[in-house]
Amino acid sequence: GAGVTVYHIATSVANPLRNDNFVALVSKYFKQEPMLDRNNEPISVKDMIIYNSTRSFMINAWLGYILPLKVDELKATAAGLVPWLGKNGAQKEVRKRALINSKTYEQLTHFSDLYSPYTFYQCRFRASNTEALHRSLSPEDQARFNCDLHSIDWDQYLCNIHIPGLRKFVLKGRGT
């Protein structure tokens, strides 16, 4: 409301983190610190795709994870109708892939909901109030309460704080 001063601690005007830079930093991190599969083998990092909307991302995720499940369901139905199709012992593998794909899609949907406001929102945020506050501090307090947005080192922040934090607290150590 009126009279409320807003202090942005992140900005798309001063020292923005562009999507292409984000992709490069995340890819670099996971090439150096790969996730591990259930056999403790490193998972290779594929090139990431930058989508222009949440919708295009979710369509691609559906095509990659849910559509194959639907195809497997049709195959299973056909195998039930034609008994000799179901004798290859693949049902267990199909159920396993279905579980993995559905869980992966569920996680992608969760992260899409979480991050899409930051990646597809077309507004630009200035941090002039935060910058003015920082300038008003004594040199000692500026060093103690560093909120100079121009000094954010995105590589250091993402690779040493943000991604390790996601791995520890969101993924709860899975894949490490």
Image: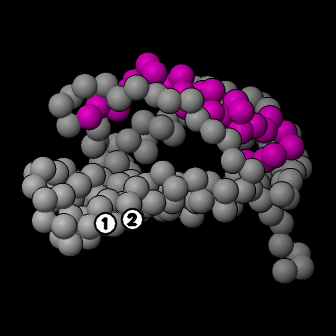
Say which of 158 and 78 sits in front: 78
Identify the residue under disc 1.
Answer: 73
Residue 91 screen position, x and y as percent:
16, 57
Q: Answer with left or right where residue 86 lies relative to residue 115.
A: left
The residue positioned 51% from the left and 59% from the top of the image is 62
Determine which quarter of the picture holds residue 17: top right
Say which of 115 and 93 sits in front: 93
Identify the residue under disc 2.
Answer: 70
How busy is the neighbourhood of tag 1: few (under 14 within 10 Å), some, or many (20 plus)? some
Residue 48 screen position, x and y as percent:
58, 35
Q: Is residue 30 above or below residue 167?
A: above
Determine which quarter of the picture holds residue 84: bottom left
The residue positioned 39% from the left and 65% from the top of the image is 70
Question: Looking at the rendering, in which quadrant would you find the N terminus?
Answer: bottom right
Residue 40 screen position, x and y as percent:
21, 28
The residue positioned 29% from the left and 31% from the top of the image is 36
Q: Which residues are magenta?
A: 10-37
For mark 1, give the secondary structure: helix
